[in-house]
Amino acid sequence: MKSTLFLTVTAQLLALVAFSAFAQTPLPDGATYSEAKALKSYAPAGSPGNTAFDAADRAAIANLIYAYSFAYDNFETEAWFSLFTEDATFVAGTPGVKAVAFKGDGFRKF
């Protein structure tokens, strides 16, 4: 009895894993697949400590990153969207998976 139960549970788990690999989640409204290459790593290729910036440029970039983070963390969607240009393309993905892109209204709906 125990071996039958074990085999049944094992077969169900294997089937679940096998069939979930074939499942494809549909793209959200307004999304397309991006031509950007999928990320393989988050590590920079070279030294991220480039010193060719002047202090004002570096401060402006840091302030923009802080503004993105603050608006996002505080659910201030209009403030967050105002930090992007009108023709912005938002590309979302994970390493090893084809990236998905959102533009215009699709970006706002995402």
Image (spheres, helix red, strand yellow):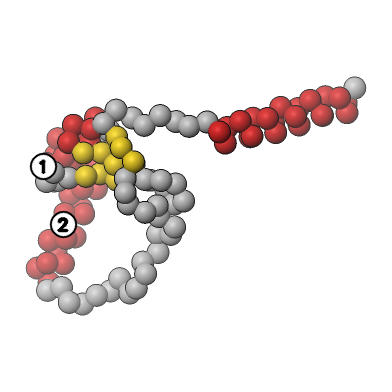
The one of 29 and 79 positioned closer to us in this rendering:
29
> Eyeballing the image, is 107 above or below 2?
below
Q: Position of residue 74 (x, y in %)?
A: 24, 38
Residue at image mark 1: 86
The residue located at (36%, 31%) in the rendering is: 27
Secondary structure state at the residue bearing disc 2: helix
Q: Position of residue 62 (x, y in %)?
A: 19, 60
> Eyeballing the image, is 44 above or below 13?
below
The residue located at (76%, 31%) in the rendering is: 10
* Label at residue 63: 2
Sooner in the amino-acid sequence: mark 1 or mark 2: 2
Q: Amino acid at mark 2?
A: Asn
Q: Amino acid at mark 1?
A: Glu
The one of 27 and 52 positioned closer to us in this rendering:
27
Q: Position of residue 43 (x, y in %)?
A: 40, 64
Secondary structure state at the residue bearing disc 1: loop
